[in-house]
Image: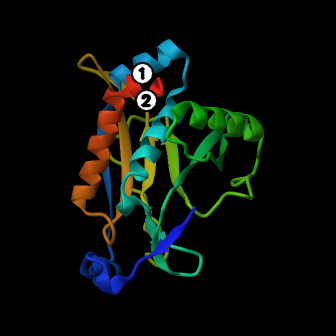
Amino acid sequence: MIFHPIDKDSWPRKPYFEHYSNHVRCTYSMTADLDITLLRTELKTNGIKLYPALIHMIATVVNRHSEFRTCFDSEGRLGIWDRMSPSFTIFHEENKTFSSIWTPFSEEFQTFYDGYLQGIETYKNAKQLFPDTNEPPNTFPVSSIPWVSFTGFNLNVYNDGTYLLPIFTIGKYRDQDKKVLLPLSVQFHHAVCDGYHAGVLFNELQELAEGCKCWLAGK
């Protein structure tokens, strides 16, 4: 993993970053349905879990675009990670708590899936919020609320406005008009992501859902 500092003076986004960081500090959430009809069918056919497939899709799009990998590092420098991995929540049914763990991202789904299953097995009985003390700094958060098929979700981060990475929340899928629709909410920081970038993210996720036969087969 490599962190590339941004030279603000030559950065085309500088005026937008400064405006939405210093003058009108602004984050926004967008919720949209993903049509996972074909994806769910293919996953069931191959005995693959839905949650890690969705996480892999999200991480794939995040790693395609620098806007979703822009943040401050531990030294307070603004920059872009060359590669990011997902940090995601797992639920503990026995006491209704959750833990946040991570899996290294791989473009090859099976490699990522094997890592996901290994992580679940390792931390399935963990009682800590962050049981893996070796999580690297180049991760981004994904969580799931599989009990509610929401139409909107707003996450409020109370800090000094320096958390720039997108935050993903997956909802409960539902059957509608002979389709299987899954709500996904993403919180963006306007300093680094505009509505255009949000549109790119959701559209590319839908394309991955529709092209699932290829990437599930490693093609």
Q: Amino acid at mark 1?
A: Arg
Q: Amino acid at mark 2?
A: Trp
Q: Image point 69% across, 40% down: which residue?
A: 119
Residue reaching furthest to the front: 219
Dot in front, 1 or 2: 2
Return the residue nearer the eye: 145 or 47. 47
Q: Image point 54% across, 22% down: which residue?
A: 48
Query: In the rendered view, does 117 fall on the left or right side of 72?
Result: right
Q: Look at the numbered discs 1 and 2 and tell me whether their residues touch, using CB distance below 8 Å.
A: no
Q: Quadrant of the N terminus?
A: bottom right
Q: Secondary structure at mark 2?
A: helix
Q: Secondary structure at mark 1?
A: helix
- Residue 33: image location, x then y, percent: 30, 37
- Residue 174: image location, x then y, percent: 36, 25
Return the residue nearer the eye: 86 or 35. 86
- Residue 45: image location, x then y, percent: 48, 12
Q: Earlier in the sequence, mark 1 or mark 2?
A: 1
Q: Image point 24% across, 50% down: which residue?
A: 199
Q: Which residue is mark 2?
A: 215
Query: In the rendered view, does 139 fall on the left or right side of 31?
Result: right
- Residue 210: image location, x then y, percent: 31, 27
Return the residue nearer the eye: 205 or 3. 3
Query: In the rendered view, does 110 fall on the left or right side of 173?
Result: right
Figure check: 145 above or below 27: above
Mark 1 closeness class: few <14, some 14–19, many ≥20 residues within 10 Å? some
Q: Image point 38% across, 51% down: which residue?
A: 64
Residue 24 in sight: no
Inter-mark Cα distance, 1 to 2: 14 Å
Residue reaching furthest to the top: 45
Q: Which residue is mark 1?
A: 40
